[in-house]
Image (spheres, rainbow, N blue to C red):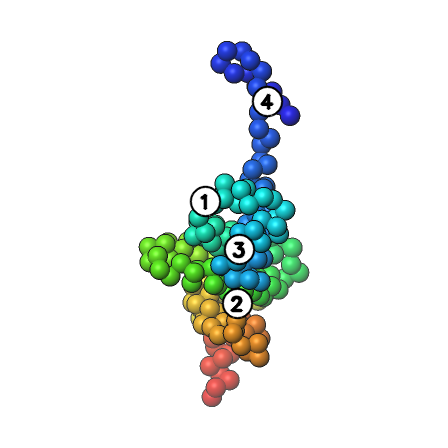
C-alpha cells in the first residue's frame, strides 16, 4: 500500500488503485448470471451471494435496480464489442472471427435481451441504451465483415450488407428464440453470414 501526505503533513494510506473497478466488474458479471438464471427481478441478496459480497456493497455501487440493470446491459455490450478485435487477432481467419463473434452476439440477444426490455417504461432510457448498443456494436460488426470479405478477395463494391443491416438481420432471426427451445437461431444466423459473404454476381448467376 502506498502512503501519501495530507495537507498538514500527516501520513495517509492511499486507496489501492483499480480495486473498486475490479470489484464492480465482478459484481456486474455476477448480476448478469443471476439475471439470466432468475430474471431481472431476482433478489439483490442472490446477486450479492453470487458475487461473494454483502448486500450493502451492491447498493453502494447501484442504489436502484434500474441503475444495476442499465450497468449490466452496458457491461455486456462492452464485453461483446471488445471481443471483436480480440477474435480478429486470435482467429485463424477473419471469417472465423466474424462467425465466432456473431455467435457471441446471438447469445447476448437470446439470453440478455430482457435487460433492455426491463426498462420499457422509461422511453428515454430505452432510447439511450439502443443508441449505445448501435454505436458500440455496429462498427465492430462492420470491421469484422469487411475483414472477412477482404480475405475472400471481395471489394467493397460487392458488399450486399453493411454492419448495421447484418446486425439487424441477426436480431430479427433471434426473435422468439428465448421462448422456443426448438428454434435454432444460431443455425439461421450462420446461414445469413454465408449469404453475406457470397459474391453478389455468383448469387445472381445461381438464380438463372
Label 2 vs label 1: CA separation? 27 Å
Residue highlighted by disc 1: 63
Residue 132 vs 198, above or below: the answer is: above
The earlier-in-sequence mark between 2 and 1 is 1
Q: Taking 142 as reference, is 107 left or right?
A: right
Residue highlighted by disc 3: 43
Label 3 vs label 4: CA separation? 36 Å
Residue highlighted by disc 2: 110
* Residue 40 percent location from the top left of the image: 49, 59
Q: Counting other residues with Cα less than 10 Å from the Cα at mark 1, is it few (<14), some (14-19), or many (20 or more)?
A: few
Q: Taking 202 as reference, is 95 left or right?
A: right
* Quadrant of res 34: bottom right
The earlier-in-sequence mark between 3 and 4 is 4
Depth check, front residue: 7 or 34? 34
- Marks 4, 1: nearer the viewer: 1
Q: Are marks 2 and 1 in contact (CB under 8 Å)?
A: no
Q: Counting other residues with Cα less than 10 Å from the Cα at mark 4, is it few (<14), some (14-19), or many (20 or more)?
A: few
Which residue does the image show at 51% across and 78% down from the upper left? 202
Amino acid at each position: 500500500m502506498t502512503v501519501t501526505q495530507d495537507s498538514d503533513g500527516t501520513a495517509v494510506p492511499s486507496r489501492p488503485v483499480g480495486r473498486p473497478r475490479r470489484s464492480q466488474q465482478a459484481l456486474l458479471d455476477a448480476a448478469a448470471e443471476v439475471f439470466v438464471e432468475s430474471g431481472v427481478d431476482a433478489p439483490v441478496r442472490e446477486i450479492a451471494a453470487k458475487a461473494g459480497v454483502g448486500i450493502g456493497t451492491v447498493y453502494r455501487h447501484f442504489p436502484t435496480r434500474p441503475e444495476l440493470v442499465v450497468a449490466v446491459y452496458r457491461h455486456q455490450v462492452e464485453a461483446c464489442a471488445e471481443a471483436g478485435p480480440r477474435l480478429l487477432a486470435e482467429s485463424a481467419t477473419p471469417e472465423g472471427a466474424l462467425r465466432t463473434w456473431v455467435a457471441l452476439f446471438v447469445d447476448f440477444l437470446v439470453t440478455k435481451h430482457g435487460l433492455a426490455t426491463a426498462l420499457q417504461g422509461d422511453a428515454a432510457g430505452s432510447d439511450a441504451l439502443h443508441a449505445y448498443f448501435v454505436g458500440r456494436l455496429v462498427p465492430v460488426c462492420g470491421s469484422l465483415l469487411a475483414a472477412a470479405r477482404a480475405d475472400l478477395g471481395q471489394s467493397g463494391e460487392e458488399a450486399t450488407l453493411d454492419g448495421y443491416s447484418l446486425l439487424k438481420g441477426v436480431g430479427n432471426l433471434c426473435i422468439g428464440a428465448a421462448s422456443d427451445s426448438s428454434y435454432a437461431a444460431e443455425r439461421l444466423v450462420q446461414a445469413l453470414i454465408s449469404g453475406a459473404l457470397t459474391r453478389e454476381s455468383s448469387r445472381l448467376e445461381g438464380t438463372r
